[in-house]
């Protein structure tokens, strides 16, 4: 594909964990909706100042509603991931991961909350762009490192448990009938 329609490229890095990936894709869809906030895309140029006030208001309202959805979704998503983290073994490496990962979640959350506060002081177009940037950079870098790591740590637990179950089944299978 050409680099023209860069807007809707898939930013989601697949972690290999089905549910985490499903949620990231859903989040990506919400972010794509940010790109459709402006009613008069292309007509008013790049500035909201050239648009009549009622258009601006309607954009601001839509942006606020979408931001509410985003915040709600992000909170749910983070708590889902943090619940998964409880399954990790209590090794130093895993504990460090949990600490780093939760810290990153807190940073993203506060950035989003800050974005919400800033909306009143800027035009909808600026707000939309800034939000998209915040979320997309997080979706790219955070999921590419921390979430991929979480998924592989979880997978190694599953693999170990499976190996253990197989061993157990073999042992039980070898027992002579009493």
Image: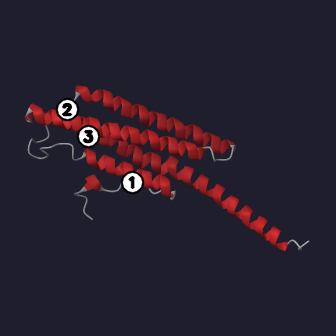
Which image quadrant is residue 135 in?
top left
Circle 3 Cα neighbour tier, 10 Å, few/some/many (<14 / 14–19 / ≥20)? few
Residue 94 falls left or right of residue 82? right
The quarter in which the N terminus is drawn is bottom left
Residue 74, percent across and down? 42, 41
Give the secondary structure at mark 2: loop
* Residue at figure coordinates x 31%, y 37% from the top left: 67
Depth order, front residue of 30/131: 30
Report which residue position mark 3 lands on: 129
Report which residue position mark 1 lands on: 25
The quarter in which the C terminus is drawn is bottom right
* Residue at figure coordinates x 26%, y 44% from the top left: 34
* Residue at figure coordinates x 74%, y 61% from the top left: 164
What is the tally of numbered marks visible in this picture?
3
Report which residue position mark 2 lands on: 123
Residue 23 falls left or right of residue 130? right
Residue reaching furthest to the front: 178
Residue 138, percent across and down? 41, 43
Mark 2 or 1: in front is: 1
Q: Earlier in the sequence, mark 3 or mark 2?
A: 2
* Residue at figure coordinates x 49%, y 38% from the top left: 104
Spatial separation of the CA atoms under disc 2 and disc 1: 28 Å
């Amino acid at each position: 594909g050409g680099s023209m329609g860069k807007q809707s490229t898939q930013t989601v890095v697949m972690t290999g964990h089905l549910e985490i990936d499903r949620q990231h894709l859903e989040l990506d869809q919400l972010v794509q909706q940010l790109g459709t906030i402006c009613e008069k895309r292309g007509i008013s140029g790049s500035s909201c100042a050239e648009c009549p006030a009622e258009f601006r208001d309607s954009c601001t309202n839509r942006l606020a509603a979408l931001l509410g959805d985003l915040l709600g979704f992000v909170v749910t998503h983070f708590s889902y991931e943090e619940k998964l983290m409880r399954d990790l073994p209590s090794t130093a490496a895993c504990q460090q991961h949990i600490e780093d990962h939760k810290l990153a979640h807190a940073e993203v959350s506060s950035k989003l909350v800050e974005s919400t506060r800033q909306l009143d002081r800027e035009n909808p177009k600026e707000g939309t762009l800034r939000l998209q940037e915040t979320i997309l950079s997080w979706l790219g870098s955070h999921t590419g490192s921390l979430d991929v790591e979480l998924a592989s740590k979880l997978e190694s637990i599953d693999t170990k448990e499976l190996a253990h179950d197989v061993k157990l089944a073999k042992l039980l299978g070898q027992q002579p009938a009493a």
